[in-house]
Image: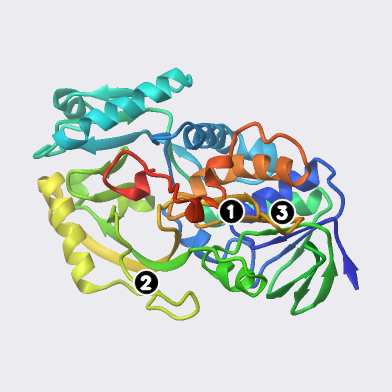
Amino acid sequence: MATADVVVLGGGSTGTSVAFQLARRHSGKVVLVERDTAGAGPTAKSIGIIRLHYSHEPLIRLAARSLELFARFEELTGAVADFTRCGFLLLAPEREMVVLRANVELQHRLGMVSSVLAPAEIAALDPRLHLDGVDGAAWEPGSGFADGYATAAGFAAAARREGAEIWETTAAQRLIVDGGRVRAVQTARGEISTPAVLVSCGPWTPALLQPLGVNVPIQASRQQVVQLAPPPAFGVLGVVIEDMAQGFYVRPEAGSTILAGVLEEEAEEIVSPDGFNRGVDFDFVERVGRMWASRYPGAREAEVRRGYASLYDITPDWQPVLGAVDGIGGLYIAAGFSGHGFKLSPALGEALAAIIAGEPPGIDLSMFRLSRFAEGHPIRGRHAQGILG
């Protein structure tokens, strides 16, 4: 039987980040178990937006620390995350401006660089923008985007160099608990005896934990993305934009194209994580195209290059479940990220590795405890769209 001091289940950006941080701090033998290959799940389809705009201090701190780590990812891991610092612009209608200003003020108190822009200042950033329905914006010049697959693969390779084992194409089948403590993990390659397990399996997390009597309210939501190519005369999109007035986002992509999708409070479509339509719906393409044309009427004739659908692992409050599971020693969760886990994953690697090692995490994650749902204390962001946190 194989043995490990810590087993990490799930090879997305968070699981690989935790495995890397555990290995580099010499927390014993670390084994990461991934049903496919590292980064090949929903992380590979992440839109990759990295921003600091949140309503709660722990989220801002996690995002800010992650931004620091993305900026020096190659120095840290020896790999590249394809991080592009192009700036992040959050467009807001009048009804969202009070919250937007409060969030920017919170960022300032925490030492972050951001500002509130009036419509004239937004137009100065990109004169091509049509600002109908926009009363202002939050602007983060240091934010941007990165690549999900490259990030997870980079963390996994760095974890290996630090001594961790990465068991790819190996399904985790069940957790073995005895006397109120984790004892082992049964995998397709055999059993691993271990006193500590982090379950970071996205929408597959509930199925692993339910047999233990641990009910995690995570559902798999199908989320679509479309790639558009504006007319050549448009040039390039220079910033990441999230548009609360219309409810969509756009970010630059290679070849002067853009990736676009929607910001919604409700799940688009609840599906089985093992069987869903991975293509894009025609009405979704039309909807996103209309919103793009409204903001950039000079580029309304954008060509549709491709589209795809992936998964969000969503919770009732659109916030993650992080930390130890009450009642089962050695069991930890990092799941339910609801579409904003990628941007937090570098800092979560540090914080969760500390928690598993029995040390203070540096950033207080207690608000993300699983028990908040049973306690009736869900986390609510101040903006209407839950995904904005």
Q: Nearer the viewer, residue 91 or 127?
A: 91
Say which residue label 3 marks: 157
Q: Secondary structure at mark 1?
A: helix
Q: Earlier in the sequence, mark 1 or mark 2?
A: 1
Residue shown at 33%/70% (left/top)? 269
- Which numbered circle lies on residue 65? none
Q: Is residue 68 left or right of residue 182?
A: left
- Which numbered circle lies on residue 13? 1
Classed neighbour count for the residue bearing mark 1: other residues with Cα under 10 Å, few (<14), some (14–19), many (≥20): many
Say which residue label 2 marks: 270
**Residue 381 drawn above or below residue 286:** above
- Name the kind of residue labelled 2 in the image: Ile
Q: Secondary structure at mark 2?
A: strand
Residue shown at 19%/25% (left/top)? 124
* On-image quarter of the C terminus: top left
Q: Secondary structure at mark 3?
A: helix
Nearest to viewer (mark 2 / mark 3): 2
Residue 1: percent from left, percent from top: 91, 73
Classed neighbour count for the residue bearing mark 2: other residues with Cα under 10 Å, few (<14), some (14–19), many (≥20): some
Marks 2 and 3, Cα distance to the nearest angstrom?
33 Å
- Name the kind of residue labelled 1 in the image: Ser
Q: Quadrant of residue 194?
A: bottom right
Q: Is residue 7 left or right of residue 3?
A: left
Classed neighbour count for the residue bearing mark 3: other residues with Cα under 10 Å, few (<14), some (14–19), many (≥20): some
**Residue 317 drawn above or below residue 93:** below
Residue 109: percent from left, percent from top: 44, 18
Residue 186: percent from left, percent from top: 77, 75
Nearest to viewer (mark 1 / mark 2): 2
Residue shown at 35%/25% (left/top)? 104
Residue shown at 62%/59% (left/top)? 200
**Residue 150 drawn above or below residue 100:** below
